[in-house]
Amino acid sequence: MKFGKVDNPGEIDFTLPKDHPDTLRVFQRGSPITKPEIFVGCAKWSKKDLKNFYPKGTKDELTYYAQQFNSIEMNSTFYRIFPPAQFEKWRDKTPEGFRFFPKINQSISHYKQLNNVEQVLDEYLLSISHLGDRLGTIFLQLNDRFAPNRMHLLEKFVSIWPKDLPLTVEVRNAEWFSDSAVASNLYQLLESNNVSNTLVDTAGRRDIMHMRMTTATPFIRYVGANHESDYKRLDDWVARIEAWIAQGMQELYFFVHQNLEVESPLLSAYFIEQLNSKLGYELKIPNGTSSAKDDQLGLF
C-alpha cells in the first residue's frame, strides 16, 4: 500500500491525535461491553504478497490464512466483481466466526465516482451476499479526486445503500478535512445513516487522522512504514483501544498494511500479542510469528 508513503518515516510525528469530542458521544450511546469483539487481519492472502508466511507445501492459501487470522480486508473485490459461486467457495474455506471485509469495486468508486451506479452496485452486492454469515463491513474507498463538491453523490449513495448491510467510507481528498464545516457535514451524513467513518493511519497523510468515529464500531486501516516506529505506533493503538472499550466501543476492525506487504503478518501478530497481554484478549497468534517484533526489526 503506497498511499501516504514517505521516504523518511523516522521524521514523522506519529503521535495519535486526541479523539474528536463527538467520538465519546457516539461510543456512549450503547451499553458498554466488557470485551468487544476485535477483528485483526491483513489486506490480502496471496502467497505472492505474504511471502514466507505460508509453510512450504501449503496448497490452499485462504484455508491456511483463515486458520491464523479471524478476518481479511478483501482488496481483490476492488479490481473485479467475482461471480457468486466464487464467494461461496471462499466462504466454505473459512471457519465459523471468520469475516471478509470487501472493498467496493472500482467501477463504482473510481470510474463512475458514485454517479449512476445503481445497476453495478446491485450486481456487486448480489455477488458478495454469497459470503453469507462470513460477510463483515463493506468498505467504500473514494477516489483522491472525489472532493466535497461531489457531496451530493455521496448523499445519494448512502441513501440507496441497504440499511441491513454495514458500510464504512474512506475519503482521501484533503478538502474534506481542511474546512471544519465541510468535515462536520460529512460526519453528520455518516453518523445519521449509521455509516462508519474509516480512519487511515499512514505516514504521509496525518491530516486524515480525524479520530471522529460515526459509529461505535471503528474501522481502522493501519499502514506500517517498514520502520522500527511501526511497533510504538501499534502500542499507542492498544492504549487508545483500551480507552475506547471503557467508553463503550461495540466492536473493532483493524487491518494492517505495509508498503512491503510481506511484513504485514509480523506486525499483525505483534498487535495481537499486545491485545492479548495488555487487554486480556485470547486472539490466536498466527503460526510462525512469535517474537514478531524481533523478527521484523532484523529486516530494517
Image (spheres, helix red, strand yellow):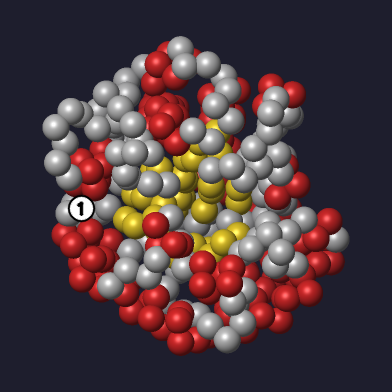
Question: Would residue 115 be seen by someone viewing this image from the given angle?
Answer: yes
Residue at left offset 40%, top offset 66%: 80
Instruction: Name the residue beneath numbered marker 1.
Output: 94
Q: Is residue 39 left or right of residue 113?
A: left
Give the camera-side residue of 168 and 3.
Answer: 3
How far across and down, in percent of the image, does residue 164 sit? 41, 77
Q: How many marks?
A: 1
How far across and down, in percent of the image, does residue 25 sit? 65, 59
Question: Would residue 133 be seen by someone viewing this image from the given angle?
Answer: no
Residue at left offset 14%, top offset 41%: 59
Q: Is residue 173 left or right of residue 244?
A: right
Give the camera-side residue of 22 and 226.
Answer: 226
Q: Picture quarter containing residue 201? A: top right
Residue at left offset 37%, top offset 70%: 81
**Vertical order, 207 against 287 (above or below):** below
**Vertical order, 58 against 219 (above or below):** above
Q: Which amino acid, by three-letter code, is at mark 1? A: Thr
**Vertical order, 67 against 105 (above or below):** above
Give the camera-side residue of 217 and 249.
Answer: 217
How far across and down, in percent of the image, does residue 216 sit? 53, 58
> Is the residue marked by circle 1 packed among few (<14), some (14-19), or many (20+) residues within 10 Å?
many
How far across and down, in percent of the image, does residue 206 sit? 72, 42
Q: Is residue 257 left or right of residue 81?
A: right
Helix, strand or loop status at disc 1:
loop
Residue at left offset 68%, top offset 59%: 144
Give the camera-side residue of 165 and 107.
Answer: 107
